[in-house]
Amino acid sequence: MVDGDKSTPAPAWLLDGPGAILQLIRREPEGLTKLDIAHRTGISRTAVSQRVDTLLGLGLLEVRSTAVFGRGRPAERFGLARGRRVILVADTGATGMRVAACDATGEVLGEELLDIDITTGPIEVLTVMDHGFQRQMRAHGRTPADVIGIGIDVPGPVAHDTGRVVSPPIMTGWHEYDIPAAFRKRYGCSVIVEKDTNAMVLGEHVRALPDVENMVFVKIGTGIGTGLLIRGELYRGTDGAAGDIGHVSLTGRDDDGPLCRCGNRGCVEAYAGGWALARDLTEAGYAASSVSDVVNAVRGGNRTALSLVRHAGTILGTAISDIVNMLNPAVVVVGGQLAALDDILLATAREAIYHRSLPLATRNLRIVPSALPDPGVHGLARLVADTVFHPAAVDRMLLAPKDGD
Ligand SMILES: [Zn+2]
């Protein structure tokens, strides 16, 4: 997943070291005073002062505000220094890509939407991506030297340890392609590659549902996939393949049901994915080649399209109920291009979920449309920042402050 950092990982970082303190401060948008830190950690005020001075010396902290309490001395609140540091992210779908520049805290400085076709392969798509990165840097007066990390998500399975895409059903030509290497030379920083739905569930958690620790993000676009957040952490499974409900079999037979892009028959996606709906709509006599064609047909009052989307909602709900029964999440967030039809799609999906799930699993369940236009962007920015400012990485900077590791 992470590239550009080949050094041997340090043993456990110091629980009361500067890295641990920075981690605490990063979680507080308003910043913390030295006294806050001493109270929260139980570390002595003298030691807290030393750690804060060290972090200020490394340029990792800035004074966010100064408050005067009574007649005491003014108390400075410290936050993560933003400075010129920039995180570049690219949230990549089958037909569109959102490129953004974020500051070190994950705030979006600017973003743009680009049309792509993922099947044109990595060289073409990554070139479009890098041009987007360069435009964003120019727009915000940054250079490659200011880039502390890059986060990229893709609509396909990613091997968590290498950041490479593995046998992606829709990403023609991307199998085992070394995406981080494409950016290593120009930027020389960590490059994180993640499955799109993982970035989305994290982004939704960070920006919209910070108090929800167990949730599922279901992306319904050209394909169907899910991201799982368990106890506030991404759940990727052993190799990074967890959560792929798009290829769960609905028929339980290999010789039954419509042919899927993965080569099997009867997958959830082969019934309810955007590509399958476009196929069915075309077969019914209304030319449709993309998810937006399907959305437009429904919005235009096409009754065939409407009934196809309703049916897709039922299929989706059936698949989601398996996840609900297995993981008992608090929230299921539905996003992706087809989720624009949430009034129709979610209504039938909800019905199926409640019908097929255990009553205890749905007692506190909420099923909601995504609250953000760009959950992937926020999730990627958080993933990059978590890597760059990991306590162990920060403590290592102390050993080699000039290189910044
Ligand atoms: Zn399939």
Image (tube, grey):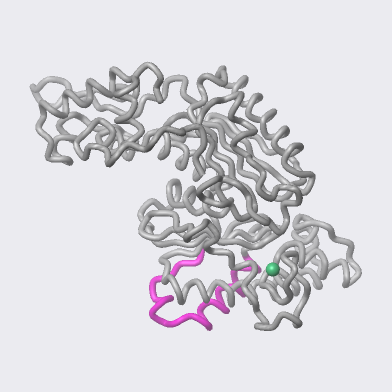
Q: Is residue 200 above or below residue 300?
A: above
Q: Quadrant of residue 267?
A: bottom right
Is-magenta flag for residue 361?
yes
Q: Residue at x 65, y 34 (%)?
A: 112
Q: Nearer the viewer, residue 281 or 249?
A: 249
- On-image quarter of the C terminus: top left
Query: Quarter containing ligand 1?
Result: bottom right
Left or right of 78 in this view: 111: right
Q: Is residue 106 above or below residue 218?
A: above
Left or right of 63 in this view: 373: right
Q: Nearer the viewer, residue 365 or 260?
A: 260
Left or right of 104 in this view: 347: right
Q: Quadrant of residue 28?
A: top left
Residue 364 is situated, as x and y percent measured from the top left of the image, at 39, 71
Magenta stretch, main secondary structure class: helix
Q: Residue furthest front?
A: 8
Residue 134 is situated, as x and y percent measured from the top left of the image, at 64, 24
Q: Residue at x 12, y 20 (%)?
A: 73
Residue 315 is situated, as x and y percent measured from the top left of the image, at 65, 75
Q: Magenta region: which residues?
A: 343-368
Left or right of 116 in this view: 382: left
Is-magenta flag for residue 244?
no
Residue 159 is situated, as x and y percent measured from the top left of the image, at 56, 52
Q: Residue at x 13, y 36 (%)?
A: 43
Q: Is residue 403 above or below residue 272?
A: above
Q: Is residue 332 above or below residue 71?
A: below
Q: Residue at x 49, y 40 (%)?
A: 2
Q: Quadrant of residue 386?
A: top left
